[in-house]
Amino acid sequence: MGNDIDTHLGKRLRRRRRLLGLTQQQLAGAVGVRFQQIQKYECGANRISAARLWQLSEALEVPVGYFYDGLSAIARDTAPAASNDSEGGEMFARKETIDLIRAYYLLGERPRRRLLDLAKSLNGVEQLEA
């Protein structure tokens, strides 16, 4: 089970790093390690200490809990977790998705809100109060 957790944390780390457009070298510099250590974290070969996880969450601008999202599914049964992760993971690993998210966050707050409203209206999702 420990290795499954390390692998899950590593996948979440890689996903967020790529989403922000950071290289392993850039992330390593931000937390004071070598890029090889980031490689080891991402593939699950090395465990991430609590202190390092905190530093990574600060550098990647996410709460520490982000890394554990979806982990309870792995604990219950590895088969459903693998299928859930592959579906969600594939979507967030696509270049198109990453490019869209980067472009979205380059917009100011008001244009972002308008774009989100437009996307929801095109998809038929009810508007939520901002």
Image (cartoon, rainbow, N blue to C red):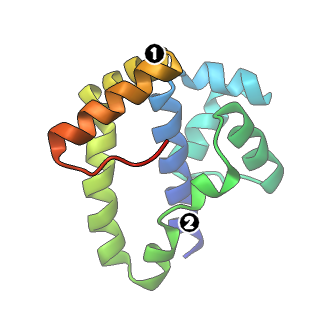
Classify 10 Å Cα crowding around label 1: few (below 14), some (14-19), many (20 and above).
few
Element carrying mark 1: loop
Does residue 60 appear left or right of residue 76 in this picture?
right
Residue at x 47%, y 15% (from the top left corner):
106
Residue at x 43%, y 75% (from the top left corner):
73
Q: Quadrant of the N terminus?
A: bottom right
Residue topped by disc 2 = 5
What amino acid type should be assigned to the residue bearing mark 2?
Ile
Which comes before the other along the chain, label 1 or label 2?
Answer: 2
Does residue 30 appear left or right of residue 14 in this picture?
right
Residue at x 17%, y 48% (from the top left corner):
124
Q: Nearer the viewer, residue 19 or 48?
A: 19
- Note whether 124 is above or below 115 in the view shown: below
Q: CA distance from mark 1 to mark 2?
A: 35 Å
- Note whether 26 is above or below 88 in the view shown: above
Residue 111, image x, y percentages: 41, 19
The answer to whether residue 19 is visible is yes
Residue 87, image x, y percentages: 25, 56
The answer to whether residue 21 is visible is no
What amino acid type should be assigned to the residue bearing mark 1?
Leu
Residue 69, image x, y percentages: 52, 61
Residue topped by disc 1 = 107
Residue 89, image x, y percentages: 33, 49
- Quarter of the image where one finds residue 55: top right
What is the number of callouts on the image?
2
Q: Nearer the viewer, residue 54 or 78?
A: 54
Element carrying mark 2: helix
Q: Residue furthest bottom?
A: 76
Residue at x 79%, y 55% (from the top left corner):
50
- Note whether 9 is above or below 77 in the view shown: above
